[in-house]
Image (cartoon, helix red, strand yellow):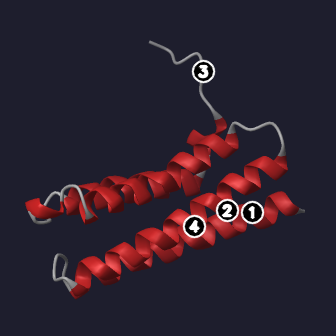
Amino acid sequence: MIDMYQSNFEKLKVWEKAHQFALLVHKVTKKFPKEEVYGLTSQLRRAVFSVPTNIVEGNERKSRKEYIQFLSISKGSLAETKYLLIVSRDLKYINDSLFDNLNEEINNIGKLLNGLINYLEK
């Protein structure tokens, strides 16, 4: 079946990277202790899924100003994700190597978000 409605966000590299990253972090959190299911696990999942979600919502807005606002929220969620991954590392829920890989991806997504914001501000 042909999708009659395909939004532009699906063509954005930043959305694709953020989406794949959110899926990866979700998978990683499945190994967190059960007592964290309503704590750190839940908060980390909400933060990481907020990144691509706000890209999508902003992309559907009518004005550049609104789009940029949602991309800024996405950046904030990305920073929150980074902090929660630092906590996860410090609590030994993830090892240093995994943290380094995840942090590198956070940095890459952040650069893409900044690039899109800069483009929209022109």
Mark 4 vs mark 2, CA separation in Å: 6 Å
What quarter of the picture does the C terminus occupy? bottom right
Q: What residue type is labelled 2?
A: Ser
Sequence-first disc among 2 and 1: 2
Q: Which mark is residue 49?
A: none
Answer yes or no: do the residues labelled 2 and 1 have beta carbons within 8 Å? yes
* Residue occupying the point 33% across, 84% down: 100
> Which residue carries the number 3 mark?
5
- The residue lying furthest to the top in this view is 1
> Which residue carries the number 1 mark?
117
Q: Which amino acid does label 3 sit on?
A: Tyr
Mark 2 vs mark 1, CA separation in Å: 8 Å
- The residue lying furthest to the right in this view is 122
The part of the image, by quadrant, that contains residue 47 is: bottom left
* Residue occupying the point 71% across, 68% down: 115
Q: How crowded is mark 1: few (under 14 residues within 10 Å), some or many (20 or more)?
A: some
Kindly state the secondary structure of the residue where label 4 is placed. Answer: helix
Image coords of residue 12 (percent x, y): 61, 49
Answer yes or no: do the residues labelled 4 and 2 have beta carbons within 8 Å? yes
> Which residue carries the number 2 mark?
72
Residue 10 shown left or right of residue 43 in the figure: right
Q: Which mark is residue 76?
A: 4
Mark 4 vs mark 1, CA separation in Å: 13 Å
Mark 1 vs mark 3, CA separation in Å: 25 Å
